[in-house]
């Protein structure tokens, strides 16, 4: 993902830290924004890392619904939505990169034209065929539709982790797909055995 760019918290990695973190792979992990995160794109955010390698990382913010329903989105692209249960589901802000483009995070993976297979369960698809299937009631069992994504250049995510901008924890797809948006961040914190309200209070007194 070279060339992808999100907000930079720091400019350079210490050389010893760079070598120590070179094998880090946070694919299929949650990034939990620490209370000190002031970037408006990521404050109080929960981000699902879709890909992380030596070239950089990309992810989808999964707890930022916007005031656009799936029925409204599908009307904009001239695809009538034939699934009543999806009509009022909200589209999410997925991150500050390519906010005019749709991304579908889904389970199961399926066989779509352009899918990043994150693991054997979860995929991220950008091709129109998945939207056509959703409009016809034949889409994936679980899905989260976003506009935009979060991107990190080579070494940038490692750099931000070294500055304690994020907590990371292996992801549980049920948090993304089964819980309401406002419950996802606390649920991810609970995977670490931490209460976000307590963490915020402690950070405020630091």
Image (cartoon, helix red, strand yellow):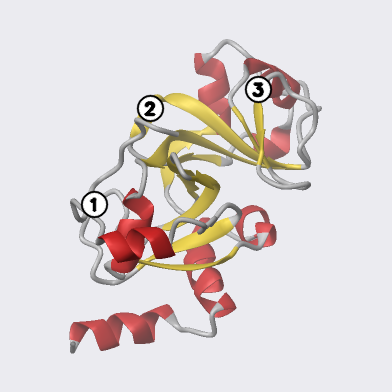
Residue linked to disc 1: 40
Instruction: Name the secondary structure under disc 2.
Output: strand
10 Å neighbourhood of mark 1: few (<14), some, or many (≥20)? few
Q: Residue 126 at x, y = what percent?
A: 58, 25
Query: Which is in the foreground here, disc 1 or disc 3?
Result: 3
State whether residue 39 is above or below residue 204.
above
The reply to whether residue 191 is in sight is yes
Residue linked to disc 3: 114
The residues bearing labels 1 and 3 have C-alpha atoms spaced at a distance of: 30 Å
Q: Residue 171 at x, y = what percent?
A: 61, 62
State whether residue 188 is above or below residue 160.
below
- For the N terminus, the quadrant is top left
Of the image marks 1 and 3, the number of the one nearer the N terminus: 1
Q: Nearer the viewer, residue 132 or 35?
A: 35
Q: Residue 120 at x, y = what percent?
A: 78, 46
Residue linked to disc 2: 98
The residues bearing labels 2 and 1 have C-alpha atoms spaced at a distance of: 17 Å
Query: Which is in the foreground here, disc 2 or disc 1?
Result: 2
Of the image marks 3 and 2, the number of the one nearer the N terminus: 2
Residue at 21% over, 53% down: 12
Q: Quadrant of residue 122?
A: top right
Q: Is residue 203 left or right of residue 184?
A: left
Residue at 77% over, 21% down: 136
Q: Nearer the viewer, residue 132 or 54?
A: 54
Instruction: Name the secondary structure under disc 3.
Output: loop
Q: Is residue 153 left or right of residue 105?
A: left
10 Å neighbourhood of mark 3: few (<14), some, or many (≥20)? some
């Amino acid at each position: 993902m070279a060339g992808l760019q999100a907000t930079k918290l720091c400019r350079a990695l210490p050389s010893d830290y760079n070598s120590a973190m070179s094998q880090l792979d946070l694919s299929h992990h949650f990034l939990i924004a620490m209370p000190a995160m002031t970037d408006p794109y990521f404050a109080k955010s929960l981000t699902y890392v879709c890909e992380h390698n030596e070239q950089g990382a990309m992810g989808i913010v999964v707890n930022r619904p916007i005031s656009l329903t799936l029925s409204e989105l599908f009307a904009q692209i001239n695809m009538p939505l034939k699934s009543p249960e999806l009509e009022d589901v909200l589209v999410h802000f997925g991150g500050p990169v390519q906010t005019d483009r749709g991304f579908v995070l889904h389970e199961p993976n399926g066989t779509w034209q352009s899918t990043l297979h994150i693991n054997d369960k979860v995929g991220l698809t950008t091709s129109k065929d998945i939207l056509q299937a959703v409009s016809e009631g034949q889409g994936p069992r679980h899905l989260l539709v976003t506009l935009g994504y979060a991107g990190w250049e080579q070494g940038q995510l490692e750099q931000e982790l070294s500055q304690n901008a994020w907590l990371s924890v292996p992801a549980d797809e049920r948090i993304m797909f089964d819980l309401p948006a406002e419950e996802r961040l606390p649920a991810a914190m609970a995977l670490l055995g931490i209460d976000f309200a307590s963490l915020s209070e402690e950070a405020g007194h630091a």
